[in-house]
Amino acid sequence: MKTGPVEGSRRPKVERAVGALLLVLASACGPAEVALESEPPRTQSQALHTTNGLSLNGLSLNGLSLNGLSTAEFTSWFQTNPALHDTVMRYVVLCAAPAGVSRTYTSPTGETHVWAGKLGLAPDWTSGAPATLAEQRIVSACLAAHANKYGTHIFLSVLGLSATGAAIPSSPVELLLFSEREACFFGNLFTPEGLYVGNDGRPLNDRESTARACALSAKGNVVSQECPPLVRVEQSCARFCTLDDSRNFYVSCTYNGITWPVITTRMLRSDIHTCGDGICQSTETCGTGGTYDNCGKDCGPCP
């Protein structure tokens, strides 16, 4: 998989991606619920949190065709990897379309896929107009926020503004529940501009790990390229991003000479694992020591 920005020679395929997603979002269907693997924590504002689990492979939109869901081109793209592309479409619609709006696709085998909107970050695109640059960028940031290195499902607090400046709903209860500041995401998957992530919270120490490793890095691993095509920035979000008046999330980040719309994430403290707590997590490895990548305390010695 390519790291960093999409090469300019691939622009035609990226333009086809934009056209395909536009037509997908323009085809009207009835409302549907987002299917979560487990119930999220109950809070006052259910619109704030989402679950993530998009594979890093899903952060490539180059394979989408120019036309909409009913075309042979879309079917050809979708059927090359139905499981992955079902997940990609789930998160595209979740990010771009508002709650109560859904999109449906029926495969040649008769299997029906329903993708529900939730965050409403791209209202013009959802209504059938061409995606604006701001919509491309905020949907890209949202997709990046919902990807993780291990493909596991973790509940997040997702904060930010839509392309038209409407804030994603939040509540003090959820901000308290999702107590760990995590990351800022920005960039553009639809052009060669690239996709970026920066630490917003405290760096993890050597004993700590999380399935959100693409977003929350360790002290000694701030700029490591662990999660292509996501590029980790060298400084924390606070150094180059502007806070909302509430100071709970960022409204823009200026990086590489571009001022980007941004998605800010927070996470549950319980989703940060510590070597020595007696549980061998998927983010920990066997060994003889007490660090997450040599965690004999939880995972035992390596065979």
Image: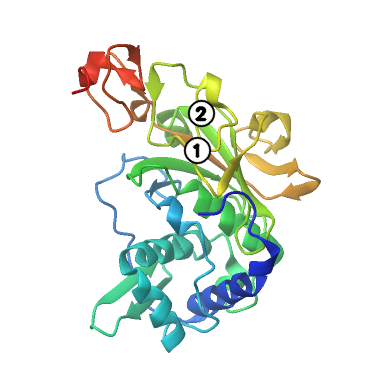
Q: Residue furthest bottom?
A: 71
Q: Quadrant of residue 225?
A: top right
At numbered mark 1, what does the secondary structure look like: helix, strand or loop? loop
Point 59% across, 64% down: residue: 122
At numbered mark 2, what does the secondary structure look like: helix, strand or loop? loop
Three-letter code, disc 1: Glu
Mark 2 to mark 1: distance in Å?
10 Å
Point 40% across, 63% down: residue: 90
Mark 2 or mark 1: which is in front? 1
Circles 2 and 1, Cβ within 8 Å, touching? The answer is yes
Three-letter code, disc 2: Ser
Q: Is residue 212 above or below residue 25?
A: above
Percent position (x, y) of residue 29? Answer: 40, 79
Q: Is residue 187 above or below residue 120?
A: above
Task: Name the residue nearer the viewer: 236 or 48.
Answer: 236
Residue 187 visible: yes
Point 51% across, 32% down: residue: 182
Percent position (x, y) of residue 62? Answer: 54, 68
Percent position (x, y) of residue 16? Answer: 58, 76
Residue 202 visible: no
Q: Quadrant of residue 163?
A: bottom right
| Residue 181, numbered label | none
Compare marks 2 and 1 and give the one earlier in the sequence: 2
Q: Residue furthest front?
A: 303
Point 65% across, 33% down: residue: 237
Residue wearing tag 1:
226
Q: Quadrant of residue 125?
A: bottom right
Q: Residues within 10 Å of mark 2 (few under 14, many from 20)?
A: many
Task: Name the residue nearer the viewer: 62 or 258.
Answer: 62
Q: Is residue 178 above or below residue 170?
A: above
| Residue 217, numbered label | 2
